[in-house]
């Protein structure tokens, strides 16, 4: 069995076709199947991009409701996105928009500078320059590595995170300390451990039965804030219980 994890599923379609021509079955992980690649794979194992982004939207709604209850004003949102050509972008931004619909939150800027902290910093710096006069009050990062760079850019621009600007991320691949210090309101847990274990579980099922009971197989993606930071734990597909420091990547080790 081949396990295929494309950085860009559309650009990697030629490689997937080549893998398929070998006759060896292919399992796709991390990015949901699309209309072009479904015929070449026997299933999917990985995160639910929609759930992850929806949870981020709900956390931002919660933060906005607290701000409103305290008499705060200003609900403009900037989005530090994945590259807009990346498969998870459309799923994420649509789910996030659905989650904040009907709230006072309004997206005024969205940039997909690229993955990683350096690109998050560059993207945020551009959005700050373009939108500062409108008022910037919230920022959503499609992953915490991108958001970590963005938070640095906001602080260098003079914003106090958690007060002037409220940040919500996803993936928990950034820095736990940002949540502990109140600079980031929350994230969603996306565990590489679960992704790896689920992929192996799906391969074993396929080799034993010749098919998967479910074509799409998701890992859990719960919301994490300061309120539950020290108590979140999930059972792995190996049956063992893991704490958040074992489940998140980035600067999360205890």
Image (cartoon, rainbow, N blue to C red):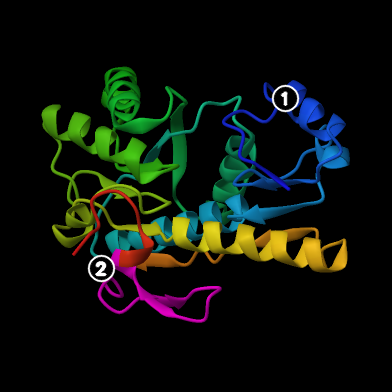
For the point 24% across and 44% down, the residue is 165
Residue 195 lies in quadrant: bottom right
Asked whether residue 190 appears in the rendered view, the answer is: no
Q: How far separated are the C-alphas under marks 2 and 1?
A: 42 Å
The local secondary structure at tag 2 comes to loop
**Numbered disc total:** 2
State which mark lies toward you, 2 or 1. 1
Residue 241 shown in magenta: yes
Instruction: Where is residue 144? Give x, y as percent.
Output: 35, 45
Q: Residues within 10 Å of mark 2 (few under 14, many from 20)?
A: some
Q: Which residue is mark 2?
A: 226
Instruction: Where is residue 118? Give x, y as percent.
Output: 28, 25
171 lies left or right of 211: left
Can you say which quadrant of the picture contains the C terminus?
bottom left
For the point 34% across and 24% down, the residue is 119
Q: Nearer the viewer, residue 96 or 216?
A: 216
199 shown above or below 240: above
35 lies left or right of 236: right
Residue 87 lies in quadrant: top right
Q: Which residue is mark 1?
A: 15
Asked whether residue 98 appears in the rendered view, the answer is: yes
Instruction: Where is residue 248? Give x, y as percent.
Output: 35, 58
Residue 22 shown in magenta: no
For the point 40% across and 56% down, the residue is 60
Q: Earlier in the sequence, mark 2 or mark 1?
A: 1
Q: Which mark is residue 238?
A: none
46 lies left or right of 236: right
Q: Nearer the viewer, residue 134 or 192?
A: 192
The span picked out in magenta is 227-245
124 shown above or below 30: above
For the point 35% across and 49% down, the residue is 173
Q: Nearer the viewer, residue 20 or 128?
A: 20
């Amino acid at each position: 069995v081949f396990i295929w994890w494309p950085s860009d599923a559309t650009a990697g379609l030629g490689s997937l076709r080549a893998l398929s021509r070998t006759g060896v079955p292919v399992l796709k992980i991390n990015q949901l199947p699309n209309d072009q690649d479904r015929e070449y794979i026997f299933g999917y194992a990985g995160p639910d991009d929609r759930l992850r982004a929806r949870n981020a939207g709900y956390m931002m709604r919660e933060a906005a409701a607290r701000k409103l209850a305290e008499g705060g004003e200003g609900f403009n949102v900037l989005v530090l996105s994945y590259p807009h050509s990346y498969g998870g972008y459309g799923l994420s931004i649509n789910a996030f928009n659905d989650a904040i619909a009907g709230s006072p939150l309004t997206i005024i800027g969205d940039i997909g500078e690229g993955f990683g902290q350096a690109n998050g910093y560059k993207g945020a710096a551009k959005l700050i320059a373009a939108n500062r006069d409108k008022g910037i009050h919230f920022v959503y990062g499609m992953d915490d590595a991108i958001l970590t760079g963005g938070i640095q850019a906001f602080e260098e621009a003079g914003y106090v995170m958690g007060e002037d600007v409220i940040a919500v991320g996803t993936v928990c691949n950034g820095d736990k300390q940002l949540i502990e210090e109140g600079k980031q309101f929350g994230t969603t847990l996306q565990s590489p451990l679960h992704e790896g274990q689920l992929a192996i579980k799906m391969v074993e099922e396929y080799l034993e039965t010749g098919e998967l009971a479910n074509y799409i197989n998701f890992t859990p993606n719960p919301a994490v804030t300061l309120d539950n930071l020290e108590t979140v734990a999930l059972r792995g597909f190996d049956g063992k219980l893991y704490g958040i420091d074992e489940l998140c990547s980035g600067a999360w080790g205890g």
